[in-house]
Amino acid sequence: MTDEKLLAEIAAFIGQEAMHSKAHAEFNDAWRSDDYNLDRFQAWLARKDRYVKNLHPKIQLAITCAFEHFTALLGGYILRHPEVLSTLDDDAIKLWVWHAIEEIEHRAVAFDVYQHVYGDDKIRRMIMRSVTTGFASLTFYSATRLFLQDKKKSLPKVGGNVFGIYLLGKMFVQLVPEYLSYYKAGFHPAEIDYSKIVGYWKTRLSEDYQFEGFQDHQTQILYS
């Protein structure tokens, strides 16, 4: 591959994903300290990871494209509807908002590589259908496991849990058009415009949380 811009985006993508892995590991460790047992879930994820790594690179990349589409959709929803984070503390909100912004910003990298190397839209769409089923199963399984581990605290809060399910259902319905856009001819992730909401949250993180990287971003905006 000789596209220097795409190569630079790939390098940035790898760096961001490494940071995300570290942040997720620290987040999971914090949950363990609160007596949530994630070991079986982590072992299950490790088995799935080993399975995927034995697939053809084309399939692996198509899987990455699918998951990047999902994470960008969810990231965009979080930024547009911050009320879904209202039960979290400031540090957790900061982590999720930062994560959402970065997922949006690198959402097209894997897609661009796939199109550059393979360009097989039929396989890409087929893999998305498979990943959708797996993603839904993963979400249901993990939520159920966490609920059962914390049932003594969760059961008295049935009303809040029902409201949470309502919010999730509302989110899924609202995201359907963006999700389905992945299947249309000529689709590209960049066609979903998150620029205004990302700009808003970068300003918030810069002013409220003193994120140096976002402060630099605001300086660039002011003097551009």
Image (spheres, rainbow, N blue to C red):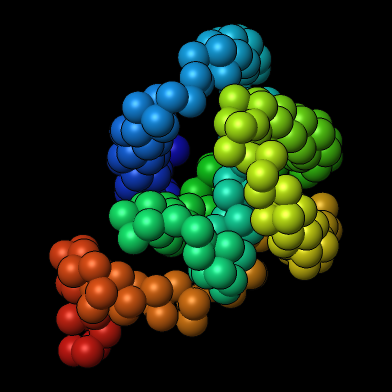
Is the N terminus in the top left, top right, bottom left or bottom right quadrant?
top left
When the figure is inspected, residue 28 is found, relative to residue 57, above or below; the finding is below
Residue 221, above or below 6: below
Image quadrant of residue 17? Answer: top left
The answer, for residue 222, to whether it is visible in the render is yes
The x and y percentages for residue 52 are 62, 17
Q: Is residue 22 left or right of residue 105?
A: left
| Quadrant of the frame with the C terminus | bottom left
97 w.r.t. 127: above or below: below
Q: Residue at x 53, y 53 (%)?
A: 107
Q: Position of residue 85 (x, y in %)?
A: 51, 61
Q: Nearer the viewer, residue 199 or 29?
A: 29
Q: Position of residue 222 (x, y in %)?
A: 22, 89
- 155 left or right, relative to 101: right
Work out whether residue 26 or residue 47 is closer to the camera in this orientation and state it.
Answer: 26
Tally of numbered tags: 0
At horizontal 52% and vertical 69% (from top left) the residue drawn is: 82
> Which residue appears at 31% of the width and 55% of the height?
91
- The answer to which image quadrant residue 209 occupies is bottom left
Asked if residue 53 shows in the view, the reply is no
Q: With respect to residue 93, does 125 lie above or below? A: above
Residue at 58%, 38% in the rendered image: 153
**Which quarter of the figure has residue 56?**
top right
Q: Nearer the viewer, residue 96 or 186?
A: 96
